[in-house]
Image (cartoon, rainbow, N blue to C red):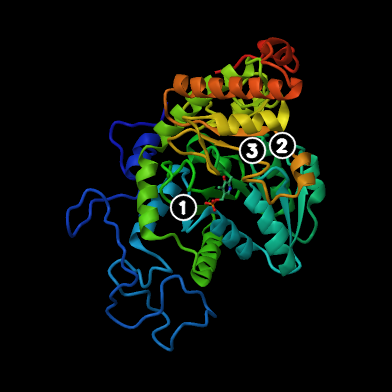
Amino acid sequence: MSGIRSTPSPSTPRGICTTAVHAGRTPDAASGSLVPALVQSTTYVQRVPSRPALQTPGDLDAGPIDYDAPASSPAGHCYSRVSNPTVSVLEEALGALEDALPSVCFATGLAAETALFLALLKAGDHVVLGEAIYGGTVRLAQQILAPLGITSTFVDSTNTAAVAAAITPQTKLVFIETPANPTLVLTDIEAVARITRAANVPLAVDNTFLTPVLQRPLDLGADITVYSTTKHIEGHSTALGGAITSRDAGLLDRVRFIRKSTGAIQAPLGAWLTTRGISTLPLRMKQHSRNALTLARWLSVHPQVSAVHYPGLSCFPQADLAAKQHTNPRLGGAHHGGVIAFEVVGGAPAARRVLTGVRLCSLVEHIGSVETLITHPASMTHGDVPPEHRRRVGISDGLIRLSVGLEEPEDVLADLEQAITAAHVGVVRQESGAAIESNVEVGATGTEGRASCLASL
Ligand SMILES: *Cc1c(COP(=O)(O)O)cnc(C)c1O
């Protein structure tokens, strides 16, 4: 079922939880420490003068020394901007989770995206991006890449023909995110990969929402996965980080060269905390998914809720694609992650009251932590995205994003219930200018047929 064999060897595929706990980690030979040491050192003692590891020909800071020798420290490290043992442990662990080469880890998710863009794009090149993506990615394309002469086209990537039509001879990268942030609209990775393969353009998938535990883009034909490890992968809101994962060694070398040259590597403490997070990632992702499904079902029949977006609901328009794409043969079954988006009756004013009325949920710009987090995308995560772009991709001013944590879902449900009820009463009072009215009549609009919206497992 999950690939467990009786006598695992290093080459044997192991269960996903075993990989999560052990990959990349060996007891420290010098101290016997079970947990790999946190190496804060910026530099490494070398036996002889040698060029830095990973240096590529033509790199200017190479000294006139022995050009053929690797770094002569015991593990080949020379300086922590280039590589660091604690970061290397995380890179092996993360790569192993999706049967890829060791990942390349960065200070943040956006640093990882920046390095990917700089590794693949130069002035005159073109990138095709899904239009429903992380706000910071939109800003990077429009405000950083465009002035550098790199043009971008945003397309509705749910329409694979639109992706094909946007590719030009100058296109050097297609970049999508699925499920989309925050609307959870899905892109069919396999279908898009067929198009990018035919056009000989690399396909990158931002897999932050589902992580390699719940979705395997590289198995579906993508060339690169992109992560903000700041979210579910670290999982406890204590370390920023980003990663690029691939099975293409040449591409990863280019990404590593950009990381070294721009100084974007992750700090050792962040990497150490992120590796600790990976140990429980499969367990957490399963539980986040279960809790989110419970809450999505409850929201979908709530009289004051006008829309719920969660790929695990049978009323989700792309439920079939979700069931197919959100699977990992090493985990079994489909799981749809911890993020839900919903709208309350009463639009933006009611949403504002919900966001300020919650007590257990925290109003933050974040997803993927053990705590349940609530966000207003239009003014927070997507505040820098032009309003017409927001409207086009379905980010209404009343949309609420919920990142379901690991509390008992009943407790989160009770908190949302009190906030939604109070918001509704407040809006009714404001609109009528009179005493509190019965909610039932107002709540009934927009809930037509919703009771039939049942969840699938
Ligand atoms: C948060 C996030 C990013 C950016 O990551 P940082 O670590 O905040 O730089 C990119 N993509 C998605 C989907 C995200 O949620």
Classify residue 324 by image quadrant.
top right
Q: Is mark 1 within 8 Å of ligand 1?
A: yes
Residue 54 located left or right of residue 144 = left
As drawn, 71 above or below 61 = above
The kind of residue tagged 3 is Pro
Q: Residues at badges 2 and 3 in contact (C-beta under 8 Å)?
A: no
The residue carrying mark 3 is 182
**Quick one: which residue is furthest to the bottom in this view?**
64
Is the C-beta of the residue carrying label 3 under 8 Å from the nearest atom of ligand 1? Answer: no
> Which residue is pictured at 38% across the width and 74% down the height?
70
* Residue occupying the point 56% across, 50% down: 226
Identify residue type, mark 2: Asp
Q: Quadrant of the N terminus?
A: top left
Q: Which mark is residue 397?
A: 2
Q: Quadrant of residue 28?
A: bottom left
**Residue highlighted by disc 1:** 240
Q: Quadrant of the C terminus?
A: top right
| In the rendered image, the vertical position of residue 397 relative to residue 431, given as above or below | below
Q: CA distance from mark 3 to mark 1?
A: 20 Å
**Which is nearer the N-term, disc 3 or disc 1?**
3
Say what secondary structure mark 2 lies in. Answer: loop
The answer to whether residue 10 is left or right of residue 98 is: left
Whether residue 11 is visible to the viewer of this picture, yes or no, is: no
CA distance for labels 2 and 1: 28 Å
Q: Position of residue 268 (x, y in %)?
A: 36, 59
Residue 287 percent location from the top left of the image: 44, 27
Asked which secondary structure carries label 3, the reply is loop
